[in-house]
Image (spheres, rainbow, N blue to C red):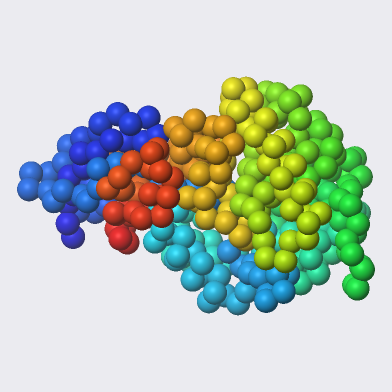
């Protein structure tokens, strides 16, 4: 095993750090004599994907499909190799991702388990319907199986085979969601809620912990979520990114969302709301960071959403004396160009150098 010496600008703030990584992969402020210099001039705590679906892909027509276990593991390995060392998987068909937690592949992974949605209110290839009267029991079963987060599909279109989807609307009565939040919190887990409608204001009032997508948030919602210590994962690649086959109406909707988010994101940052990067099924962390910057976040804040801010909210460590190294380095400064994030010089995942 090799011991490494680290002298780099520690991002997102950019102060110079002089430290090391021991032969056992532990972070230390006292590098051993003769340690090798770790490649790179800039360092971040390992990147965070706070909203992804390792076990979901897209069919040729663009519809989401469940992936087999090997493809799921390949997605996780690819994420680690790209410098994403902390992952929150926000839902998997049948809770497939939970099975990774008990394996060596599960390092740096938090998982929600199955998608919680009633019949006709989520993609049929990805979920087993959960009626309102079974919502709390289903959530607690996922926590018992190892989920530290619960994924609630709180609003969604009505899906009927052969018919266009309706506009999104609430999937469960608010009283049921209130009970869900209370019971899940009592069991030591947290709730991530998919929402793209004004139902989000009521959801925040129930005490949900993070809003996923959140394209209908307003300034009052942001203030309320920030005051509760919550977080927002806007998944910009999914919500405003273009897709093959988009209709003119869909492109117009995405442009309207983009302008709304251009207004809201800087205000959310000013309120102290934790903003986190998430790729969903379509994106990449470098592109998410670039979009955050394009929509008004300072480069330092955009990087924090993909590293320190998200790690603190999710409970992932930032380099500490004696702890396994979890970091990514770069030759160039990603504050100048977020595309640099796609080209790491070195990656450590929980004490093991994989790049």
Q: Is residue 179 above or below residue 220?
A: below
Q: Is residue 190 visible?
A: no
Question: Measuring 49% from the left and 30% from the top, which residue is drawn there?
Answer: 298
User: Quick one: 161 or 38, which is closer to the camera?
Assistant: 161
Residue 55 appears at what percent x and percent y? 61, 68
Q: Is residue 114 visible?
A: yes
User: In this image, 4 relative to 270: left or right?
Assistant: left
Residue 96 appears at what percent x and percent y? 63, 68
State the image quarter where residue 142 is shown. Answer: bottom right
Q: Is residue 179 above or below residue 3?
A: above
State the image quarter where residue 13 is shown. Answer: top left
Residue 115 appears at what percent x and percent y? 74, 59
User: In this image, 302 relative to 271: left or right?
Assistant: left
User: In this image, 81 relative to 154: left or right?
Assistant: left
Question: Measuring 55% from the left and 70% from the top, which residue is drawn there?
Answer: 72
User: In this image, 178 relative to 85: left or right?
Assistant: right
């Amino acid at each position: 095993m090799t011991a490494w010496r680290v002298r780099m600008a520690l991002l997102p703030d950019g102060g110079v750090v002089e430290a090391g990584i021991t032969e056992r992969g532990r972070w230390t402020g006292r590098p051993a004599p003769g340690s090798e210099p770790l490649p790179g001039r800039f360092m971040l705590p390992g990147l965070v994907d706070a909203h992804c679906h390792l076990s979901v892909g897209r069919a040729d027509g663009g519809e989401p499909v469940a992936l087999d276990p090997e493809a799921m593991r390949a997605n996780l390995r690819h994420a680690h190799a790209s410098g994403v060392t902390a992952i929150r998987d926000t839902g998997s068909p049948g809770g497939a991702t939970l099975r990774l937690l008990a394996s060596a592949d599960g390092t740096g992974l938090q998982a929600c388990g199955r998608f919680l949605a009633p019949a006709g209110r989520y993609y049929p290839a990805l979920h087993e319907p959960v009626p309102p009267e079974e919502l709390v029991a289903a959530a607690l079963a996922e926590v018992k199986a190892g989920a530290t987060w619960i994924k609630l599909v709180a609003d969604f279109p009505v899906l009927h085979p052969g018919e266009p989807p309706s506009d999104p609307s609430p999937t469960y009565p608010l009283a049921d969601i209130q009970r869900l939040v209370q019971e899940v919190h009592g069991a030591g887990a947290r709730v991530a809620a998919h929402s793209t409608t004004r139902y989000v204001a009521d959801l925040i009032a129930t005490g949900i912990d993070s809003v996923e997508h959140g394209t209908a948030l307003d300034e009052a919602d942001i203030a309320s979520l920030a005051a509760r210590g919550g977080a927002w994962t806007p998944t910009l690649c999914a919500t405003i990114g273009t897709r093959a086959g988009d209709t003119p109406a869909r492109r117009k909707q995405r442009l309207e969302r983009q302008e709304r988010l251009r207004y809201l994101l800087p205000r959310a940052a000013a309120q102290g709301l934790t903003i986190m990067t998430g790729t969903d099924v379509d994106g990449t962390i470098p592109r998410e960071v670039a979009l955050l910057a394009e929509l008004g976040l300072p480069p330092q804040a955009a990087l924090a959403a993909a590293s320190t801010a998200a790690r603190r909210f999710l409970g992932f460590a930032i380099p500490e004396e004696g702890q396994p190294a979890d970091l990514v380095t770069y030759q160039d400064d990603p504050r100048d160009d977020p595309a640099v994030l796609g080209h790491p010089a070195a990656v450590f995942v929980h004490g093991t150098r994989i790049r």
